[in-house]
Image: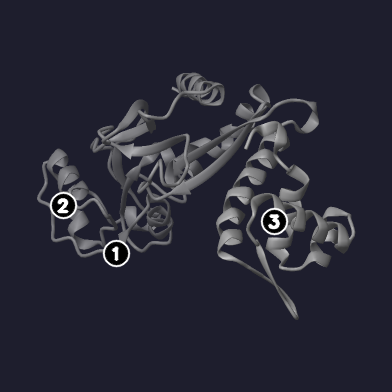
Amino acid sequence: MDRPHLPLNALRAFEAAARHLNFTRAGVELCVSQGAVSHQVAQLERRLGVPLFRRLPRGLALTDEGLALVPVLADAFDRVAATLDRYAEGRYREVLTLGVVGTFAAGWLLERLPDFARVHPQVDLRVMTNNNRVDLAGEGLDLSIRFGDGAWQGTHAEPVLPAPLTPLCAPAVAARLADPADLARVTLLRSYRADEWPRWFAAAGAHCPPLRGPVFDSSMPMAVAAATGLGVALAPATMFARELAADRLVRPFAIEVATGRYWLTRLMSRPDNAAMAAFRAWLSETVALAE
């Protein structure tokens, strides 16, 4: 069917009636009478040559043909509405959906986002935090900041910030630690990456004790646990600057080990747009100023 001949009013009436399964409620939503909705739907059914509803004594039921049409119309109307919403306040706003590993979000990014909003008011930023396990395509992300080695299949990765790991703990726990070997007498909090503590002990030139402490899927709750005195976390100190400055956490040893860094990633198949380019440039400039 040619676009100029699309029965838009009838399609809108049908979509509303299909959601409510009631002509009266659809009419209230569309600010028309029940009869007008029924008439529009009947016209659409005649035009298509198939029934879209079964008229029942106590309401409506969709036919197979109606069920096939509903998701197509709902998606189309939602996309039109989302695009029109971007013209709020008399200007076009481009949506940018950003995935961020929670540690980087809380420890570095969120306090700096007001500056991004000030510099780029045209970008409607949507931030989705995660524990570093992310599916760019499946979650509909334009960009994602994640921790690792930058080698993710089908993904373009740009380095953002180094994040060497170092022991962090409560002051009372640190008072008992004079040497890396003393860590064998306290609980070592762990991430799901099993090689981190062994690599740190190797860098410290000390034997790694058996690892039996709690396992966390993010450095954020692990650092909170360390601050309560549960044990010693191995985490990026740069992400916990506020806690270190307030002495909620301390570094018993200066030794660090690099097991990865933070990267800004996107699918290689994802075409760049103005919002993505704006965020990438802002992030690069902001990181440079913070160094």
Instruction: Specify the quadrant of the image occupied by residue 228.
Output: bottom left
Q: Split into 4 quadrants, where in the image is the C terminus? A: top left
With 79 as the anchor, is 226 left or right in this view?
Answer: left
Q: Which residue lies under the disc numbered 2?
A: 181
Residue 158 picture location, percent across and down: 36, 25
Disc 1 secondary structure class: loop
| Disc on res. 214 | 1
- Which residue is painted at 29% across and 64% down in the image? 214
Disc sitting over residue 177 in the figure: none
At label 2, the amino acid type is: Ala
Percent position of residue 209, x then y: 13, 57
At 74% from the left edge and 31% from the top edge, which residue is drawn?
Answer: 87
Q: Where residue 63 sits in the image (x, y, percent)?
A: 60, 66
CB under 8 Å between discs 2 and 3 = no
- Camera-side residue of 38 and 161: 38
Could you tell me how far apart the alpha carbons at marks 2 and 3 are, in whole angstroms? 79 Å
**Frontmost residue, 36 versus 70:** 36
Q: Is residue 233 visible?
A: yes
Dot 3 corresponds to which residue?
45
Q: Secondary structure at mark 2?
A: helix
Task: Locate residue 139, reporting x and y percent.
Answer: 45, 46
Q: Amino acid at mark 1?
A: Pro
Asked if 208 appears above or below 24 in the picture, the reply is above
Mark 2 or mark 1, earlier in chain: 2
Q: Earlier in the sequence, mark 3 or mark 1?
A: 3
